[in-house]
Image (tube, rainbow, N blue to C red):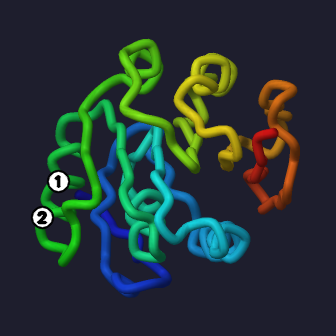
Amino acid sequence: MSGSVRIIGGRWRGTRLPVADAEGLRPTSDRTRETLFNWLQPVLPGARVLDLFAGSGALGFEAISRGAREALLVERDARQCEALRETAARLEGGDAAKIVQADALALLRAPLHGLFDLAFVDPPFGGDLWDTALQRLGPWMAGQAWLYVEAPLQRNIQPHADWRLHREGTTRETRHALYRRG
């Protein structure tokens, strides 16, 4: 592991999450996560969360830390998956995080794991995985679900018509947007 990010709010505030030196792994910045979770605070208590390209796990663990009932963290890389499992094991209540080692796009073709109230779609920027992920995500999401999408600033990612933009923001390198279904 080459670095770490920290959980910035909730019961696990200040907990460090290891970040591997892996191609394409780019954790969401503290500032962007703070903004996102301020937007989400009213909907997090009791929510089922899908962190589709988990990486460091910062989004999924942050959601649980701030009141989500459970989170399914999907990560393809075996080493990073093991780091996520170790993190969950050392956190009190970490069993609310379910870690699955899988290709996110392949997983979305598999039988449902139940409906989710919130999904994070923040894939490695070099992979151009947004469109396929967003096409396959629909059946996994509850009727009034929320969707967070992070992409390079120059990419204009648009979920399908049943998602309405709720809030959006930018940094020097990224665009982040929160959508509501229905």
- Taking the spot 49% from the left edge, 83% from the top edge, the residue there is 9
**Alpha carbon distance from label 1 to label 2:** 6 Å
The secondary element bearing badge 2 is classed as helix
Q: Tell me the number on the disc at residue 169.
A: none
Left or right: where 22 falls relative to 99: right
Position of 176 relative to 12 (above/below): above
* Residue 161 locus on image (x, y percent): 87, 26
Would you name the residue on which mark 2 appears? 89
Position of 31 relative to 167 (above/below): below
- Taking the spot 73% from the left edge, 42% from the top edge, the residue there is 152
Q: Amino acid at mark 2?
A: Ala
In the rendered structure, are the residues bearing label 1 and label 2 in contact, judged by CB atoms less than 8 Å apart? Answer: yes
* Residue 51 locus on image (x, y percent): 46, 46
Q: Is residue 150 visible?
A: no
Using a 10 Å C-alpha cutoff, classify the residue at mark 2 as few (fewer than 14 neighbours), some (14 to 19) or many (20 or more).
few
Q: Please tell me which residue lies in front, 71 or 1.
A: 71
- Taking the spot 32% from the left edge, 50% from the top edge, the residue there is 21
Q: Please tell me which residue lies in front, 112 or 23.
A: 112
Q: Amino acid at mark 1?
A: Arg
Position of 160 relative to 156 (above/below): above
Q: Is residue 172 visible?
A: yes
The secondary element bearing badge 1 is classed as helix
Which quadrant, please, contains the N terminus?
bottom left
Q: Please tell me which residue lies in front, 130 or 112.
A: 112
Q: Tell me the number on the disc at residue 85.
A: 1
Using a 10 Å C-alpha cutoff, classify the residue at mark 1 as few (fewer than 14 neighbours), some (14 to 19) or many (20 or more).
some
